[in-house]
Amino acid sequence: VTRRGSERARDAAFDRLFGEHRQSVLAYFLRRVDAPCDAADLLAEVFLIVWRRLDDVPAGGEAAPWLFGVARRVLANHRRGVRRRNGLAVKLRSTLDRRAVPSPEAAFDDEAVARLRRALETLPEIDREIVTLRAWEGLSASDISVVVGGTPENVRVRLHRARSRLRSILDLPGVLEEQVVP
Amino acid sequence: MITDPLDRLLEARASFTDMAPPSAALDSALEDMAVQIKRTPYRRRRHRALVAAAISGSLVLAAPAAANWVSARTGWFGSPGMTENDTSEYLRQDSPEMAAIVESHGRDYPLPPGGSYAGVVERLRASTGGRGPELIQDTGVRTMVAQESVCQWQALWLSADDAGETDRRYRAGIVLEEAAAWPIFAQVDGGGVVELRRRVGAAATEGTRAPVEQDFRANCAGRDSQAGR
């Protein structure tokens, strides 16, 4: 395999990953940051890591939880105040700003969403992530365990307890049995 | 249709996909990002000029008085099939030749600007404690050199993180990430060494401080590897 051929293969592998996952990773950030333009920088950070560590990205269906795991750590850094403006996301930042993506709260009853947000804040960070990865990204317990660590069984237990706690705080009617998480 | 009230509430909170559907402008901005990312380097550049400078410096320092010259070479090699040694040669730690051996191994590992392997030579000499000649296998020397490189890049990473210098931190992170693939760590891995290098390297490129700091404290603190700090 020539050097040029290997670089083309590398480019193609990156393009495939970027094409398949860019929208879901961008959505992951937009759901969790206050300013949409921050999501642009965070997305660039994740795929810069992918570009650097392309050989580490698992194949097939295991790529998505691996990517969300990276996204989770990048977001944690962002929340600790680590700012990265590396110039890779200039156009996307501007696009997201121009589109003026409304905050999710704007589209929903303010009081209900405010209560949900407060309720989520009472959960330990890992439980909050488990609940939202399941509800927002639609990940299975197995995939969530890749993102946050631990075993799928542990994820199922924590998810069940966290959802019960949310129901209690929000005074929502209980369900006879929580849906079995795949 | 979602019937569970908790799921309805969570879904409403996350309705990004309805509010920001894919569009030509968004696609164009994303493609632009991908092109720019692919222009960034993914392979480290060797700091050969710096290493060469360090070598020539230490060779001058290592020039011995002929009467005191003691070769590091013993001609004694480790026996095959043992768990506590490999088959590399045993070397005399107190030999002035050791500086050249350290620097020779050092050519395989990068150093940050201002870094050197002088600390490794000093530790090898000091560990004899004046009790006469002590021996170390060549593989052991190489491991110390590779670890010293890691320590100095971690020092640089932590210093850059303290200063908020993301570019400098990123460059150091690339080296720390690549260290996991250095053959010496796989060669001496009795369990967890490569995995530790891989985990710390990944944290470094992601900008996550705790694993880098923890590894530095555990494996580098107290040694003379403060380049960049």
Image (tube, rainbow, N blue to C red):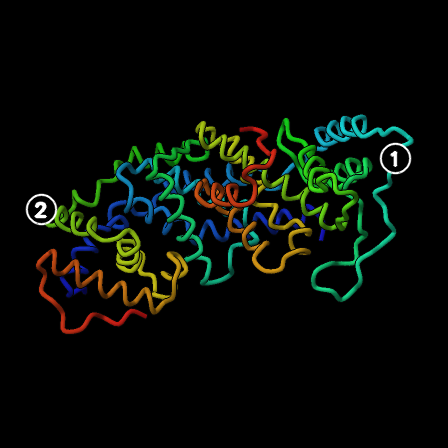
Q: Could you tell whether B174 is left or right of A102 in the image?
A: right
The kind of residue on which mark 2 rests is Glu
Q: Report the mark closest to the observer, 1 or 2.
A: 1
Percent coordinates x, y for residue B206 in the rendering: 46, 43
Q: Chain of mark 2?
A: A
Residue A111 bears which disc, if any? 2
User: Residue shown at 8%/59% (left/top)?
Assistant: A171
**In the rendered image, the vertical position of residue A182 relative to residue B192, given as above or below:** below
Q: Could you tell whether B229 is left or right of B75 in the image?
A: left
Q: Nearer the viewer, residue A181 or B83?
A: B83
Farthest residue toward the right? B67
Which residue position is annotated with label 1? B69
Q: Chain of mark 1?
A: B
Disc 1 to disc 2, how far (Cα)?
Answer: 83 Å
Q: Secondary structure at mark 1?
A: loop
Do discs 1 and 2 belong to a common subunit?
no
